[in-house]
Image: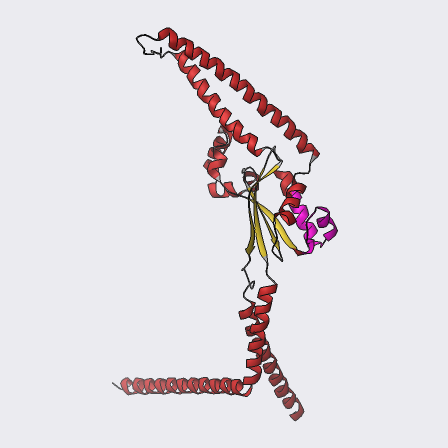
């Protein structure tokens, strides 16, 4: 029974201590708030000037210092993927070195405005797998032993995708003649791959001619069979194995001819440009946001300087008193 009053007294002491701490915290908060208000009133003119200057300068810089991104979708032909990546990396290194002589030598106008360039594969696993049976089987085997997501993003796999995205940035708007055409001309400037292109085109043309001849012979054979088996105005086809093979061969050759015609459209260049998108305004980081960033930065720096000076004066006063 004697323990209950003691516990009650301890609880009252704890509550009193808690109320005291809460009161002190509220007093400190009110004091800090008053100091902040007094600082704002005392320096109102300076803060307003900094705000106006920051907003005005930010609007001006946002309007005059814009950065634009440009996208170029390309397909490297004749096994020129590594060649393409090496050339893009070389251009990027020249940009970092500020080698405007090299860039102007490529025919790029306003070379100083070129900020960066990079290339990455366009991941399309379905198109990759449909290119031929070998790629499909390779993916199946690799997927059994590893994560398919890691596989499709590995450099060894990604460079085999048919399409790649070249992204470059400029500090001003541009057009096709100023940048895209010179870049493509440089990327297609290779005697070695030009010779491969010539032979490749000859091979495709030869295959198309041979396939056309074979298809014509198959058509004549089918016409002969149709006329032999026709009667009463109807055609009867003997569904034997050999005839099925002939029909399957014709179907395969027709599909091959379609693929070859598509190839002929895309193999006119070593690095074929498929799509171009220019002058996408870059709004990442602080781009286009300086009208907000600058006034906040100016005010922050002003407050930081005032706090530093106040701290310095207090410490100097203590040192003098000592």
State left or right for residue 308 relative to residue 235.
right
Q: Nearer the viewer, residue 206 or 177?
A: 177
Task: Provide the major secondary structure of the magenta segment.
Answer: helix
Q: Position of residue 192 (x, y in %)?
A: 69, 32
User: From the viewer's perspective, is residue 10 above or below residue 176?
Assistant: below
Model colouring: secondary structure
Q: Nearer the viewer, residue 14 or 146?
A: 146
Residue 17 in sight: yes
Residue found at the far front of this picture: 233
Residue 147 in sight: no
The part of the image, by quadrant, that contains residue 5 is bottom left
Q: Position of residue 170 (x, y in %)?
A: 62, 55
Is residue 108 one of those drawn in magenta?
A: yes
Q: Residue at x 37, y 86 (%)?
A: 19
The part of the image, by quadrant, that contains residue 14 is bottom left
Question: In this picture, which residue range is highlighted in magenta?
Answer: 86-112
């Amino acid at each position: 029974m004697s323990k209950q009053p003691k516990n009650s007294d301890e609880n009252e002491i704890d509550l009193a201590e808690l109320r005291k701490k809460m009161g002190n915290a509220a007093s400190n908060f009110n004091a800090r708030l008053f100091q902040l208000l007094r600082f704002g009133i005392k320096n109102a003119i300076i803060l307003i000037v900094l705000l106006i200057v920051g907003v005005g300068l930010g609007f001006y810089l946002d309007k005059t210092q814009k950065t634009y991104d440009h996208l170029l979708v390309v397909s490297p032909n004749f096994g020129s993927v590594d060649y393409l990546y090496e050339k893009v990396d070389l251009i990027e290194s020249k940009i970092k070195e500020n080698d405007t002589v090299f860039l102007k030598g490529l025919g790029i106008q306003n070379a100083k405005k070129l900020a960066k360039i990079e290339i990455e594969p366009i991941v399309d696993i379905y198109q990759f797998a449909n290119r031929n049976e070998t790629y499909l089987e390779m993916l199946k085997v690799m997927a059994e032993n590893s994560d398919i997501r890691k596989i499709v993003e590995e450099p060894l796999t990604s460079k085999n995708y048919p399409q790649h995205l070249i992204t470059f940035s400029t500090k001003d708007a541009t057009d096709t003649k100023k940048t895209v055409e010179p870049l493509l001309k440089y990327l297609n400037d290779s005697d070695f791959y030009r010779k491969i292109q010539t032979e490749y085109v000859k091979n495709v043309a030869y295959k198309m001619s041979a396939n056309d001849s074979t298809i014509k012979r198959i058509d004549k054979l089918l016409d002969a069979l149709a006329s032999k088996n026709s009667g009463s105005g109807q055609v009867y086809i003997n569904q034997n194995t050999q005839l099925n093979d002939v029909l399957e061969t014709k179907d395969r050759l027709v599909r091959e001819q379609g693929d070859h015609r598509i190839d002929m459209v895309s193999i006119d260049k070593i690095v074929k440009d498929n799509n171009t998108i220019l002058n996408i305004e870059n709004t990442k980081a602080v781009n286009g946001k300086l009208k907000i960033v600058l006034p906040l930065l100016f005010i922050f720096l002003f407050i930081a300087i005032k706090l530093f000076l106040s701290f310095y004066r207090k410490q100097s006063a203590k040192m003098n008193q000592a």
